[in-house]
């Protein structure tokens, strides 16, 4: 019997996470937590029921050990990871069988690595990180907790991405660049210089557009 798992989230990213979990064949998805839409309780989603909001954690923590986040919001994944641990859950990983990951990569709890992603030698992937479809993270990159690397992003070697940062779809970051925390890189940007914490940057080459609070 497979260990039982909850997926927190019941929208687009949860579909992807649930698909990876089923392909991995190492957890049984018991249900989904949807805090945003209480009216969806009881609805079938991706072959399992939506159980309700976060109040359900106090019921299901008696019988289920594992949980994974199935939503893209970086700050919410960072904030809620403490809550689920306090409630007694262990964060599971979802790693697609068609992701390519070097043997010496370290991967934190709760990480999701989607189809076609490549993570190269000596990269460090933090807790609750998403490396989305066909993104590449090259050698010795450091991806801190709660980061979302969107589909088709390419990070050169030794790039650091600070905690809570979202790198938008198709962005490219040249080698050795350091991107701060809670920053947002717009779709298609080419990042050639370091970026500080808490800014929106986009364009080719990427420029800081404004300060933001994610
Ligand atoms: C950057 C982003 C967050 C929007 O930022 P914003 O400042 O609110 O942008 P707005 O939509 O108000 O647009 C302002 C201007 O910036 C331009 N712009 C927006 N995003 C841009 C981008 N990524 N690159 C270049 N220009 C962009 C708009 O065309 C607009 O130009 P205009 O004033 O000449 O019409 C958004 O466009 C983006 O890139 N999000 C990433 C989405 C993503 O990666 N999704 C993946 C999900 S898995």
Image: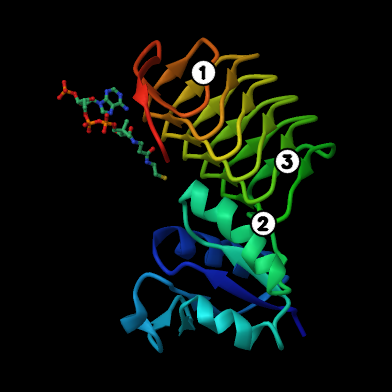
SS at badge 1: loop
**C-alpha distance separating marks 3 and 1:** 27 Å
Disc 2 versus disc 3: distance between alpha carbons?
16 Å
Q: Earlier in the sequence, mark 3 or mark 1?
A: 3
- Which mark is on residue 110? 2
Between 199 and 192, the one nearer to me in the picture = 199
Q: Up-down: is 100 above or below 210?
A: below
Whole-percent x, y for residue 33 in the image: 49, 75
Q: Residue at x 63, y 59 (%)?
A: 81
Instruction: Say whether residue 126 is left or right of residue 36.
Output: right
Q: Residues within 10 Å of mark 1 (few under 14, many from 20)?
A: many
Q: Residue at x 39, y 85 (%)?
A: 41
Mark 2 or mark 1, whichever is nearer to me: 1
Write down the quadrant of residue 147 in the picture: top right
Q: Which mark is residue 195?
A: 1
Residue bearing mark 3: 101
Image coordinates of residue 121 in percent, x first then y, are: 78, 29
């Amino acid at each position: 019997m497979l260990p039982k798992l909850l997926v927190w989230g019941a929208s687009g990213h949860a579909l992807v996470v649930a698909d990876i979990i089923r392909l991995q064949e190492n957890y049984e998805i018991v249900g989904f937590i949807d805090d945003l839409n209480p009216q969806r309780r009881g609805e079938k989603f991706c072959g399992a029921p939506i159980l309700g909001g976060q109040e359900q954690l106090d019921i299901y923590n008696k019988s289920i050990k594992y949980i994974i986040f199935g939503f893209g919001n970086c700050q919410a994944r960072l904030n809620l990871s403490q809550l689920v641990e306090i409630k007694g859950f262990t964060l599971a990983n979802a790693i697609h069988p068609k992701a390519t990951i070097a043997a010496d990569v370290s991967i934190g709890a709760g990480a999701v690595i989607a189809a076609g992603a490549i993570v190269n030698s000596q990269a460090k992937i933090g807790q609750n990180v998403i490396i989305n479809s066909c993104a590449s993270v090259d050698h010795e990159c450091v991806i801190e907790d709660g980061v979302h690397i969107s589909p088709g992003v390419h990070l050169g070697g030794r790039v650091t991405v600070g905690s809570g940062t979202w790198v938008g779809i198709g962005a490219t970051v040249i080698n050795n660049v350091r991107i701060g925390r809670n920053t947002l890189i717009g779709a298609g940007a080419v990042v050639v210089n370091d970026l500080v914490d808490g800014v929106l940057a986009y364009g080719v080459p990427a420029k800081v557009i404004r300060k933001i609070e994610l």
